Structures are given as C-alpha cells and as structure tokens.
Image (cartoon, rainbow, N blue to C red):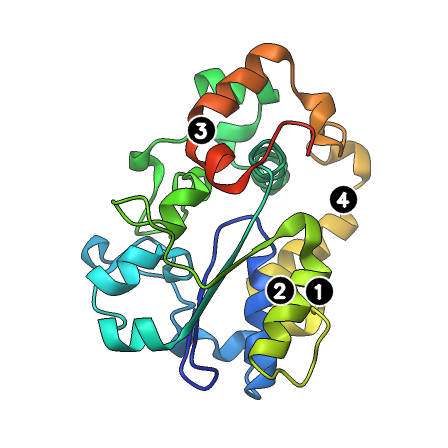
C-alpha cells in the first residue's frame, strides 16, 4: 500500500494482519475499503504490472515496476509485519480450506508434501494468488543483496504494541488497529460469503484442525517448513515454538 498522505509505504506480507493495517491507514485518510484501489489495493490482470493482487507487491517490485521512484522510496517511512513461519503457513491453509479451495481440501501434511502451491497456481483472471501467499516473507522485504529495505518490521506476535509505534510515527488519529472483518468495510462478495456461512450448519462446513498451529505439525513437517522458510528463520529469529 502506497500512501502519499502519510508519506509511507506498507509492504503487505500475506496472513500477517495486513488488511487491518491497510484499513487503519484508509480510515485515517477518510477513505473506506470500497475506495482502496488508488492506493495499489486492487486486482491486477497483467503479469508485467505485478502479482494478481497489487496489495502483495514486494518492496523491490514497488521500485522495479515503477510504482515509486528511488528518491520517494528513500524518503518515505517503509514498514511491514512478519509472523512465525509455521503459524503463518497453517493460518493460510485453514483460510483457504474454509473458503473451499480444492487444493486445500485435504489434511495439512498432504497439503505440504503433495499440494503445495507453485507459481503457476496464481491466476490473473480470477486474481487468486495461492503461490504469492506462501512466498517467504524475506522476499517481500529484502533485496537480492540480502539487505532489508524496511525502516521498521513489526511482529504479528507483538501486533498491538508494534502497530502503536507505526500509528505514532504516522500521526494516525486512531491508535488501535481495526478488525479486518468489520462488516461495514467488506465488499459485497465478502458479505455474501459471510451470510452463507451463517446459514450453513457447522457440520456441513469444511473441517478445520486445532487453532494451535503446533498441534498440526509432526517432526517431518516442522523440518520441511524450516527448510522452505530458512531465510525467514534467520532474518527474523523465529523458532517453531515462538
């Protein structure tokens, strides 16, 4: 999200409270979720212009694709948030499974070893970005030389306090982070999905594993995620348990 009003660039790592943060910035500008498109929060049909959803541009892509020039990039406050890789991936799995995405209608281990998204899964017609959602967090925030391009990287695990720092830095009128699923801010498709879910008995909804991500992993799965997200573990200091 590029906000010239705040002189800020927010790099949205998927499944790390990004929509709540975007909504906070929009609200501070007197905008709504329905008017978010001018801030690079919109679908994209052209692979040359970035991912299927521009909200998930990497820091390098903002520069390389011309959404911001180097001088402005250097001058603006650049921030992002990261999350425990094991928790983030399990959250993504549960999210897609609940939405009924076919690839995710399996147990978590089968998803990791047999159905894990690849770049070809991203679709510029439906704007479904399955692969972009599992890209390592470091690829969003670091350049090819291993340098972090952010001025501040908050943590999902410390979201309230870290967002308060961002809110103070940007002089936001509201210091508290809004809930991303606020019904008044949802578009019509999302409202319909929520309404349908309320009408369907729980026993007909997709079965979900326990909320505690640690219960969903065995040692083989822990090691697989550790290898796939090795840079994230080094760059952000995460371990499986915390």
The nearer-to-camera label among 2 and 4 is 2
State the residue position of label 4. 200
| Callout 3 touching callout 2 (CB < 8 Å) | no
**Marks 4/3: CA–CA distance:** 40 Å
Seen in the picture, residue 106 relative to 90 is either above or below; the reply is above
Seen in the picture, residue 17 relative to 24 is either above or below; the reply is above
Say which quarter of the image contains residue 210: top right
Seen in the picture, residue 30 relative to 63 is either above or below; the reply is below
Q: Position of residue 229 (x, y in %)?
A: 46, 31
Task: State which tag comes first along the sequence, 1 or 4.
Answer: 1
The nearer-to-camera label among 3 and 2 is 3
Q: Residue 230 carries which label?
A: 3
Q: Which mark is residue 179?
A: 1
| Callout 1 touching callout 4 (CB < 8 Å) | no
Q: Is mark 3 on a helix, strand or loop?
A: helix
| Callout 1 touching callout 2 (CB < 8 Å) | yes
State the residue position of label 2. 20
Badge 1 density bin: few <14, some 14–19, many ≥20, Cα 10 Å: some
Task: State which tag comes first along the sequence, 3 or 1.
Answer: 1
**Marks 3/2: CA–CA distance:** 27 Å
Badge 2 density bin: few <14, some 14–19, many ≥20, Cα 10 Å: some
Q: Which of 144 and 121 is in front in this view?
A: 144
Seen in the picture, residue 100 relative to 193 is either above or below; the reply is above
Please give the name of the residue rendered at 56% of the width and 76% of the height, measured from the top-left corner.
25
Residue 141 at least partly seen: yes
Q: Position of residue 130 (x, y in %)?
A: 43, 40
Left or right: residue 120 compared with residue 227: left
The nearer-to-camera label among 3 and 1 is 3
Residue 187 at least partly seen: no
The nearer-to-camera label among 1 and 4 is 1
Task: State which tag comes first along the sequence, 2 or 4.
Answer: 2
């Amino acid at each position: 999200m590029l906000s010239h009003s705040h002189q800020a660039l927010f790099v949205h790592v998927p499944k790390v409270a990004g929509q709540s943060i975007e909504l906070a910035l929009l609200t501070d500008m007197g905008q709504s979720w329905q008017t978010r498109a001018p801030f690079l929060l919109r679908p994209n049909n052209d692979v040359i212009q970035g991912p299927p959803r521009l909200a998930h541009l990497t820091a390098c892509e903002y520069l390389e694709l011309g959404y911001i020039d180097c001088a402005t990039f250097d001058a603006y406050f650049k921030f992002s948030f990261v999350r425990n890789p094991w928790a983030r991936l399990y959250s993504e799995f549960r999210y897609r499974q609940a939405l009924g995405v076919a690839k995710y209608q399996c147990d978590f281990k089968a998803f990791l070893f047999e159905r894990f998204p690849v770049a070809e899964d991203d679709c510029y017609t439906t704007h479904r970005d399955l692969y972009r959602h599992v890209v390592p967090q470091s690829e969003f925030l670091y350049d090819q030389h291993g340098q972090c391009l952010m001025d501040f990287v908050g943590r999902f695990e410390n979201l309230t306090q870290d967002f308060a720092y961002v809110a103070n830095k940007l002089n936001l009128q509201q210091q508290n982070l809004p809930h991303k699923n606020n019904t008044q801010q949802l578009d019509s498709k999302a409202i319909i999905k929520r309404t349908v879910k309320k009408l369907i008995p729980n026993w007909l909804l997709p079965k979900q594993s326990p909320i505690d991500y640690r219960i969903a992993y065995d040692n083989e799965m822990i090691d697989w995620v550790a290898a796939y997200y090795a840079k994230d573990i080094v760059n952000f200091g995460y371990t499986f348990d915390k």
